[in-house]
Image (cartoon, grey):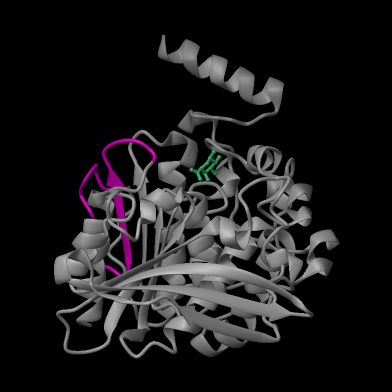
Amino acid sequence: MKTLKLCIALLMFFLQGRAQNYEEAAVPVYTLPDAFVGLHQQKVSSVHDWENFRRKEILSLFEENVYGKMPRDFDSIRFALSPEDKKAMMGRAQLKEVTITVWRSGKNVKLRLILFIPNRRKRPAPLFLLIDNRGLADIDPTRKVKSGFWPAEMIIDSGYAIAAFQVNDAAPDNKDHYTEGVLQLYPDQVTAPDGMKAIGCWTWAAARVMDYFETDKAIDAYRVFVVGHSRGGKAALWTGATDQRFAMVFSNCSGNTGAALSRRQFGETIKAINTRFPYWFCDNYKKYNDRVDALPVDQHLLLSLIAPRPLYTTNATRDLWADPKGSFLSPTEAEKVYALYNKTSALENNPPGANDPIIRSVLGYHLREGVHDLTAYDWTQFVRFAKYHSRR
Ligand code: GTR
């Protein structure tokens, strides 16, 4: 029976060329691009070589081939605060709602930020920022709706500030409307083969939110942690890679073009993601739909760009589409870049069992029992990880 199932999976894999494979035995043999060997075979053996050469090279390879260019220029930025509620959450937190307006060449984009800061604090508060790829209800400022996707009360009670912005402000998550946000400021990017699309815009927005945090004295801007789930988790990783002001990165069930290794072609593939979501990544990425081996990067290198900052990734037992094994292998592959900085990771060769989080490690990880989601369980581990690494 097992052999029959495997044969059918292999047959589908080869006949359809769709590569939606769920059988470990059908994972092709692959060679990952080496973090320490440049495109022209230059070898890297020190932090200096990594930071001044290979890291930059990898970052531009991701821009050119995957996420698109990250524009850094704009004309002005303004932060407008609505009247604050100093006694939100029954007095436990202060609520700030900030409209961030960014101008470039006469066009502007508005990003709405929701922010709770714990009232019981002696110093500026460290903060978790969620890139919210779900509805506004999940980040309800009135707290009438309380969602495990953004358990604001629990985070406040743990001593952290918590914030969120909704991705649709930056780029509507829709193939016909994704240009109706940040891309209005950068019209050249829309037609460029390496122009950023929706996920690049969400990442750009996270950086503008960080610009705000740097002005807010109640926030410890040196301890701002970015969090994202699934497509938001892909954006969180890209944020950590492109903006080193973020002190930690939490990427939940991010799957393909997130933490999962693309060359494994397990679950969602580059072709599948580009077909269903042609407006997420740059057009050049589509060239690799049928030739993943030609891609000069794989996702372990994206994780490596976050070194030496602590990075936590997760999977769920029933989320095979996101390739739990491939998403565990990529942080283990990134370990050697962390090791350059003398940061040791406690990841083992094989993924841990369900609900057995690895916290005491610069590369943290857990496999949650259950389905594709971001839950209070996940956040509880994020807080443990943040606390552990803040003490160090
Ligand atoms: C899926 C997509 C994944 C993941 C997910 C999500 O449909 O194939 O890559 O991003 O959506 O965002 O929940």
Q: Position of residue 167 (x, y in %)?
A: 54, 58
Residue 72, image x, y percentages: 67, 81
Residue occupying image coordinates x 45% and y 69%: 113
Q: Is 359 inside the magenta-drawn segment? A: yes
Task: Tell me, yes or no, if residue 38 can be seen here.
Answer: no
Q: Is residue 214 left or right of residue 257?
A: left
Q: Position of residue 33 (x, y in %)?
A: 61, 61
Q: Tag count in the figure?
A: 0
Q: Position of residue 274 (x, y in %)?
A: 69, 43
Instruction: Read off the magenta span.
Output: 352-372
Q: Give above or below for 82 relative to 331.
A: below
Q: Residue at x 28, y 44 (%)?
A: 368
Whether residue 125 is visible here, answered yes or no, is yes
Is 52 placed above or below 290 here? below
Occupied quadrant, residue 339 = bottom left
Q: Indicate whether 338 appears above or below 370.
A: below
Quadrant showing the C terminus: bottom left
Q: Is residue 328 left or right of residue 193?
A: left
The N terminus lies in which quarter of the figure? Answer: top left
Residue at 26% x, 38% y: name it. 369
Asked whether 146 or 302 is in front, the reply is: 146
Residue 314 within the magenta-colored segment of the rendering:
no
**Residue at (24% x, 42% y) in the render:** 354
261 or 113, which is in the foreground? Answer: 113
Q: On the rendered structure, is 292 left or right of 314?
A: right
Q: Is residue 123 above or below residue 317?
A: below
- The rendered magenta stretch, by its main secondary structure, is classed as loop
